[in-house]
């Protein structure tokens, strides 16, 4: 008999874009499109809509990273505004594109955990 994964393991699996149940199958069919079910364990992901949660978490994380950098660049006085924007804008875009699928996987795993029925 297979035991259920711990909540921490399930959330970490979601963060790595793997099935929160088995950790083997992929959670996404493409960049942000979740699969209907796991190809490995057949766990269903139907109805687990992360909605705006991943976007809010991503915006928060990117803001916490980029705004202090912008303050540091601005207070140093070494760079023109154009150079600062050449540093900050690509960094912001890269961080958003990197973090969004990770946070969406995390949210889907959290929703999966909340939707599970406890074994009686």
Image (cartoon, grey):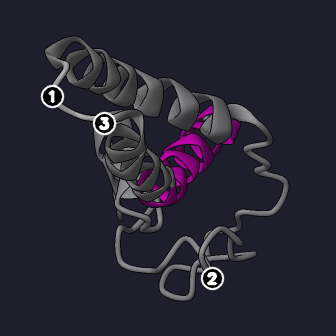
What residue is drawn where x is 76% and y is 50%? 48
69 horizontally vs 43: left or right: left
Q: CA distance from mark 1 to mark 2?
A: 42 Å
Q: Which residue is mark 3?
A: 8
Q: Is residue 59 magenta?
A: no
Q: Nearer the viewer, residue 75 or 114?
A: 75
Residue 4: in sight, yes or no? Answer: no
Magenta stretch, main secondary structure, is: helix
Sequence-first tag of 2 and 3? 3
Q: Which residue is mark 1?
A: 78
Residue 112: in sight, yes or no? Answer: yes
Q: Is residue 108 magenta?
A: yes
Q: Callout 2: helix, strand or loop?
A: loop
User: Compared with residue 107, is residue 102 higher up or lower down, i.e. above or below?
Assistant: below
What residue is drawn where x is 70% and y is 67%? 44
User: Compared with residue 79, is residue 48 higher up or lower down, i.e. above or below?
Assistant: below
Sequence-first tag of 1 and 2? 2
Q: Callout 3: helix, strand or loop?
A: helix
Q: CA distance from mark 3 to mark 1?
A: 44 Å
Quarter assignment of residue 57: top right
Q: Which residue is mark 2?
A: 30
Sequence-first tag of 3 and 1? 3
What residue is drawn where x is 46% and y is 25%? 63
The magenta segment is 97-116
Q: Position of residue 2 (x, y in %)?
A: 35, 63
Q: Nearer the viewer, residue 38 or 80?
A: 80
User: Compared with residue 104, is residue 7 higher up or lower down, i.e. above or below?
Assistant: above
Q: Position of residue 39 (x, y in %)?
A: 56, 88
User: Compared with residue 27, is residue 20 higher up or lower down, i.e. above or below?
Assistant: above
15 horizontally vs 96: left or right: left
Q: Position of residue 34 (x, y in %)?
A: 68, 70
């Amino acid at each position: 008999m297979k035991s259920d994964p711990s909540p921490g393991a399930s959330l970490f699996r979601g963060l790595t874009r793997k099935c929160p149940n088995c950790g083997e199958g992929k959670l996404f069919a493409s960049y942000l499109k979740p699969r209907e079910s796991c190809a490995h364990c057949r766990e269903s992901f139907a109805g687990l809509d992360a909605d705006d949660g991943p976007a809010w978490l991503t915006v928060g994380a990117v803001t916490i990273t980029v705004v202090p950098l912008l303050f540091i660049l601005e207070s140093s006085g070494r760079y023109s505004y154009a150079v600062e924007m050449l540093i900050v804008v690509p960094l912001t875009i890269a961080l958003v594109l990197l973090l969004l699928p990770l946070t969406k996987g995390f949210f889907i795993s959290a929703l999966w955990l909340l939707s599970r029925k406890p074994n009686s």
